[in-house]
Image (tube, rainbow, N blue to C red):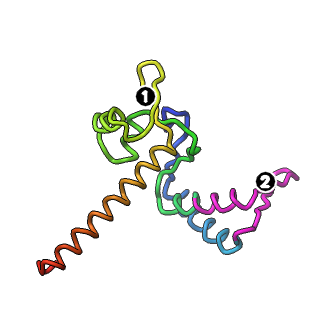
Amino acid sequence: MQLLNGNEVITPTKADAATAAESGRRLAAHLDADASLRLEVKGTSEELTLPPAAARLLVRVLTELGQGHAITVTPLGAELTTQQAADLLNVSRPHLVKLLDQGAMPSRKVGSHRRVKLTDLLIYKKETLAKRHATLDELAALSQELGMGY
């Protein structure tokens, strides 16, 4: 499947998931924070070297595929449609548009369509989650203070 921003979504078959799980486990056993990865291109004499960050990312990709999860790789600087942004926040598109109108996060218009940077969306999501946790902690403390048995 192809996303609107051009990224491909990879959905593993059961066989792919099994192979990815095994490869991920074996690769992870050999990597530390500074380990690079040398790959041999099958059928050629060519070798490729992946930097440590790419090797760690590959382990993460293989782990997710091994669990049967569909994945895509999106650069942090990518701009998302309002539907993609809403999906990432787990809200409706109209609710996201309302948040954008209220200035909850920056966006820009491309013609009549809005775009939201992934980095801005992730910052908003992190801040919102932190506020929720603080509110829940406050409610828990109040219920303890009032002896409500929670």
**Whole-percent x, y for residue 83 in the image:** 38, 35
Check the image and report above or below for 17 versus 71. below
**Whole-percent x, y for residue 14 in the image:** 49, 58
Instruction: Identify the residue under disc 1.
Output: 114
Disc 2 residue type (three-letter): Lys
Q: Which residues are magenta?
A: 33-60
Residue drawn at (33%, 32%), measured in percent from left and top? 101
Q: Is residue 60 left or right of residue 141?
A: right
The answer to which quarter of the image holds residue 145 is bottom left
Q: Is residue 52 left or right of residue 98?
A: right
Instruction: Identify the residue under disc 2.
Output: 42
Give yes or no for residue 43 being in the magenta stretch.
Answer: yes
Which circle, 2 or 1, is nearer the viewer?
A: 1
Q: Are marks 2 and 1 in contact (CB under 8 Å)?
A: no
Check the image and report above or below for 148 versus 44. below
Check the image and report above or below for 109 versus 78. above
